[in-house]
Amino acid sequence: MLRLEKRPNPSKFWLYATPIVAVILTMIAGGIMFALLGKNPFAVIQTIFWDPLFGKFAYYLRGQLLVKAGPLVLIAVGLSLGFRAGIWNIGAEGQYIMGAVFGAAVGLAAFPTESRWIFPAMIVAGAFGGWLWAMIPAILKTRLNTNEILVSLMLVYVAQTILAMAATGFLRNPEGMGFPGSRNFSSFPAAANGELFVGTGLHWGVVTAIATVIFAYVLLQRHLMGFQIKLAGQAPRAARFHGVSPNRLVVMCMGISGALAGLAGLFEVTGPAGQITIDFNVGYGFTAIIVAFLGRLNPLGIMLAGLLMALTYIGGEMASTNLGLPAAAIQAFQGMLLFFLLGVDVLTNYRIRFMMMGGR
Amino acid sequence: MELGSINLVTLIATLMVAAVPIMLAALGELVVEKSGVLNLGVEGMMIMGAICGFMTAVATGSPVLGFVGGAAGGAALSLAFAFLTQSLLANQVATGLALTLFGLGLSSLLGQGYNGIKPPPTGAVPFGPLADIPVLGTILFSHDWVVYFSIAMIAAVWWVLKSTRTGLIIRAVGESHDAAHALGYKVNRIRLACILFGGALAGMGGAYVSLVRVPQWTDGITAGAGWIALAIVVFASWKPWRVLIGAYLFGGITGLQLSLQAAGSKIPVEYLSMSPYLITILVLVIMSSGRASLNAPAALGQNFHAAR
């Protein structure tokens, strides 16, 4: 028989060990899944986790790592603040889209003028778009006690429709022969978010992500706000006695995560994606939820988790072209990772005791 | 009766069909939430049901077996949720999200090679001359068996929750798991059974999408129906018959929206296709600001660990 026994304090060792155990378990379970698909599991795992870093095309793929990790980390850091306080913003995908649409709209409105202020203005607009989209569930939550999980998620579908309207309507390239999609920012230098150093994949979004990690770390460790976030999550009653206003916390956490998701969208549309298209969003907003948990809701952990998740994206693409692995297999693989992570997490707070049947 | 260019009788008949997936999923989730568990993975279970049901129906040629397969697929995925939240005491919100993310990935993995295939058709129940009654015949007697099954399930769940010992135990576990535990009920086992029931119904609802509503397989076929089902449980303030009303309301909006699109309405298509989601938000706002939210099970979303 298995029995769980609550630990007096969460285990420090397992706090750091669980993500690693979860990754190993996912590799095993994923390997079984790949084997069932008729692929050599060792070859697939090697293609996903090893080749992008040390394989033949590593010089190119290492740069891609930052390109993919940037938006994931940016969104996940924002989400983690809310998750810590028990505020569930799961509509980051929608906020990401709105950030891209708002930012791109400002940039395209200025086309073809050249000014160094265009890109900063777009950044502000992108953050505003994401913030605005996150404020809808936040205000509904604080004023009318509406469930923020469902509202933020519903708004993803609304944002997707707005994206389609933008790509086929108000942001469509007037010189695009009627095809959907906006002007490409790569041919509009004042609004483009290019690579800062050729071949590194480093763009302004990655720089912002790193800055955000540092900012969030300081916020959580050294600032009263960070203390209140942690307190509200671990002991809501104590937080109220301490004078933490739950509503203020909801607005702050949703606002920060929305603005960061919006920034991620803006940096993506001006950089790697290049333009607004109907299928511009690729699920970063949802994968970031996995990243946030994999990083144990800790900014530094999220940075590592974001890099690992970026690796599965790049390696997954490679496995799909080289080994014919279906793209959906990687999505299932990432979902599996979150499962194992949540399951293994029991070890942090509980001891597992093996007992004889009929024992005490 | 004509409403512009839309026939009202056909609209009612369509909404009864359009409502089936969300009605089944919401009813299952209602039982789960009554037992004190918040499973946010409805979308994942529905899409697993959609693909498992589709695969079973195509393989066996029997749509009925397809629905059984769909229910099995949904229940299998919900078992993962049950194990994580009931045995390993994982956070229910996060696990539910994991279920949806994993379900979406796994379903499109399983669905490889099923694109463009037609499933065996599910025909209308032969009511004979009854179906020829002018208005009522179309509304009441022109549907397939799942439509009637879903309404019968509403009645069954209502009766079980309200008038049987089983229902009383489920509600006790959902209102106060400590009290139920003190009375000697196996809280986690009862919740496990409810989660499996919810998974099976969500899976059936998903199978209805891929076997009857669409009927074919594409990735992400459920398109947020699972989330709308979750909202309907709130709308229904955890009462079975109100799930029926809620589902018909949303079925009606979806049906009306599609008929308006087909009729070439002046309202742009984009506004029409975002309307179900906007109305869901509106309904959530109205329901949660009123007294209805007080009806939520007291132990909803809390894990139970029998500490000694």
Image (cartoon, coloured by chain):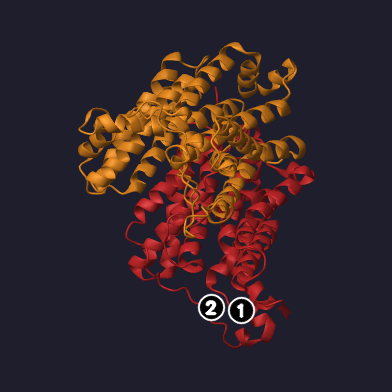
Query: On screen, B49 above or below B213?
Result: above
Q: Nearer the viewer, residue A348 or A92?
A: A92
Query: On screen, B136 above or below A305?
Result: below
Pointer 1 and pointer 2 on the same chain: yes
Residue at the disc numbered 2: B125
Residue A325: x %, y % from top left: 27, 47
Is residue A1 visible from the viewing direction of this image?
no
Q: Nearer the viewer, residue A356 or A53?
A: A53
Residue at the disc numbered 1: B141
Looking at the image, the residue that sits furthest to the front is A113
| Mark nearer the N terminus (1 vs 2) | 2
- Chain shown in red: B
Query: Is mark 1 in CB contact (under 8 Å) with mark 2?
Result: yes
Q: Nearer the viewer, residue B2 or B176?
A: B2
Q: Nearer the viewer, residue A138 or B138?
A: A138
**Quadrant showing the N terminus of chain A:** top left
Colour applied to chain A: orange
**Element marked by disc 2:** loop
